[in-house]
Amino acid sequence: MYAALAILMDRRCMLCGDYVGQDCLCLHCRLLLPYVPRRGQTDNYIELRLAGSIPLQRAYSMVKYSSGTHCATILMAIKYYSASWSACKLGEMMAADATGSGFFATADVLQPVPLHIIRHLRRGYNQSERLAKGIGRISGLPVKSLVYRWKNTATQTEKTAEERKENMEGAFRGNRKRILKALQEARARGRQWLHIIIVDDVITTGSTIVGCAKAILDAVPDEAGDIRFSVMSLAVAGDLMMGRLTPEKLHLEDCSASSEEFLDWQHRPLA
Ligand SMILES: [Zn+2]
């Protein structure tokens, strides 16, 4: 009886279709994923990319995105093919991976990047919220809804960095009451700041993350100095990857290091 039930409940690997029990990826496919180097460690390039735009503590992306890869298949599945259970399992995988680097040590809440209500209803779920739920299961952090999507923005896929930024202008609104409550709870726990981890499926230029964080800060201008952010995404798009990230792209006008020196610096051993 139990054996029959176990077979019925058995899930298939998202990538190869093998039976994997209560998981979304088989061990073989997990090993083949294009993992981001130095993920979760301090001063990784995702942190460098977002630093200065928002009060940032840490940034983590699990895998590198490029079209036609396993990573693209996974993103398509959780975004457009109702793989919401798998998104939750991927969130668990991300959290288990990031825990070792102390990623959650000072964090208070998880804030998934919200979908506009129309898109949410059409899709039936928010993939970032499902990832956050999985992260919450491992980290013990609550998933909050401190910000909502005000504008039903056009898809970002074909847009340039500048167009993405414009597209995100005013896209989010923070919920002042809920943010103040979260701040109060953090202070009651003896925290110096409210530390929010923003969760997204994929980081491309970072404009969505920045828009979301700024909406939270703008909703409580008098308390904005007491809010910090970290970022977690399942994937990071190719143009942010090592080897293609240059000082120019980071807007470091006064940086004289050549790209090679810059890469050496990124690979330097941690103190
Ligand atoms: Zn597989």
Image (spheres, rainbow, N blue to C red):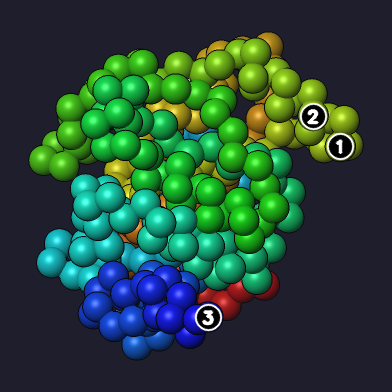
Element under label 2? helix
Q: Amino acid at mark 3?
A: Tyr
Give percent across and percent down for residue 14: 28, 70
**Residue drawn at (50%, 24%), measured in percent from left and top?**
147
Q: Amino acid at mark 1?
A: Arg
Give percent across and percent down for residue 11: 37, 72
Residue carrying label 3: 2
Q: Are marks 2 and 3 in contact (CB under 8 Å)?
A: no
Along the polypeptide, which appears first: circle 1 or circle 3? 3
Bin the neighbour count of mark 3 within 10 Å (Cα to Cα): few under 14, some 14-19, many 20 and up.
few
Q: Nearer the viewer, residue 58 or 82?
A: 82
**Residue drawn at (24%, 31%), measured in percent from left and top?**
122
Along the polypeptide, which appears first: circle 2 or circle 3? 3
Q: Are marks 2 and 1 in contact (CB under 8 Å)?
A: yes
Element under label 1? loop
Which numbered disc covers residue 185?
2
Q: Is residue 218 visible?
A: yes
Image height of 259 relative to 172, above or below = below
